[in-house]
Image (cartoon, helix red, strand yellow):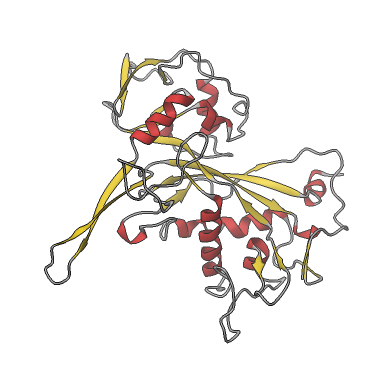
Amino acid sequence: MTENNQRNNQSFETFSFAGMALDPIHVGTGGARLGRVDNTIVRDPVTRIPKIPGSSLAGVMRAYTAMSKGKYPNCAGLGQPGRDGAGGHCGGANCPVCTVFGFAKGISSSGGFAGLAAFSDMQVLLFPVASQLGPQWITCPMALRQTNLDGLSNLGDLPDQQVVYRKNDGTAAQPSSLNLGWLFLPVKTDWEQLTNIVSSLQSVEKLKIPDYIISRLGVVSDKLFTHIVNSNLEVRTSVAINPATGAAEEGALFTYEALPRGTVLFWEVTCRNPKHFKINQNNVQAVKSLAEVKDVVAKAYSYLEHLGIGGMGSRGMGRLRVFNTMGWPHRLKTDKPADSNQSGKEGS
């Protein structure tokens, strides 16, 4: 079987993406951190590193795809029809929004469709920190392993846990120490994995991280990375204005945190083969292959650069630029591809 035929019969394929925050990004939890800020952002419960949930990404990408396909607003959002029965998801097998992102029927109707694209959480890959050398983008072995890039999926811990490793490119002498926010760490360049990390991150076939970020790359331990990120988040203060006086409203001061501008995020989109599914007993017509499912999502990424993701969008927050808009595919290695003649879950 040829590679193309095997890929066409593949059950799913995962595509990796990377992007950079053009503005601070706030995806809130609705809670507060005692003694810190009033409105906190979502964090991983284990590492305590901020992230953007896959549900947030899927929601805005559905809306932006609906805009790009002329299906807005009916096929965006929850998709429940109004009391008069108007509106709601069309649920058509030829709708690129409803097939790729799924659709729900009303409360009185059964069925629906889960959708062909699944979104992972957006994880912090490279975090910008101020230093005496200007902005530095910091990462750690744990963040690099999640990319599944060649040679990085099994990356070990750092030889020295209390230093920052930087690649010596030979153009300038490395400082003996470097401040990362309030932390002052010794600098080392003798970790043999640095060359592989740099080449993997800036590969034009994969994540396409720009050179100006790679040239300022630093690697610290997983433990230090958590502290560096949480100590250097952007915190803003807002206050309500009394329209009668034009002055600040008493007791209306609040603070909120955000991932700072320049944060590089990594996420994955897993696409399921449309040949294996039916909608209302009909074959999926809007997309015919795994690549077409991915393309429907990827073509809406340009909207993130203007309309953004998360809250406070009217206050200078949320915009994101995707580096590799076509994605980097993870090929599933199987000896026996799935039979495309057997359909999977159906929508009714």
Residue positioned 55% across, 24% down in the render:
196
Compared across the picture, whether 327 is left or right of 314 comes to: right
Residue 311 at x, y percent in the picture: 39, 57
Residue 28 at x, y percent in the picture: 42, 52
Residue positioned 34% across, 40% down in the render:
233
Given residues 192 and 263, the one toward you in this image is 263
Compared across the picture, whether 237 is left or right of 324 comes to: left
In this view of the protein, can residue 197 be seen by the observer?
Answer: yes
Compared across the picture, whether 159 is left or right of 111 comes to: left
Residue 186 at x, y percent in the picture: 35, 15
Q: How many marks?
A: 0
Residue 195 at x, y percent in the picture: 51, 22
Compared to residue 287, the image places residue 14 above or below, namely: above
Compared to residue 239, the image places residue 336 above or below, namely: above
Position of the N terminus, as image quadrant, is top right
Compared to residue 209, the image places residue 105 above or below, namely: below
Residue positioned 78% across, 72% down in the render:
280
Compared to residue 150, the image places residue 330 above or below, namely: below
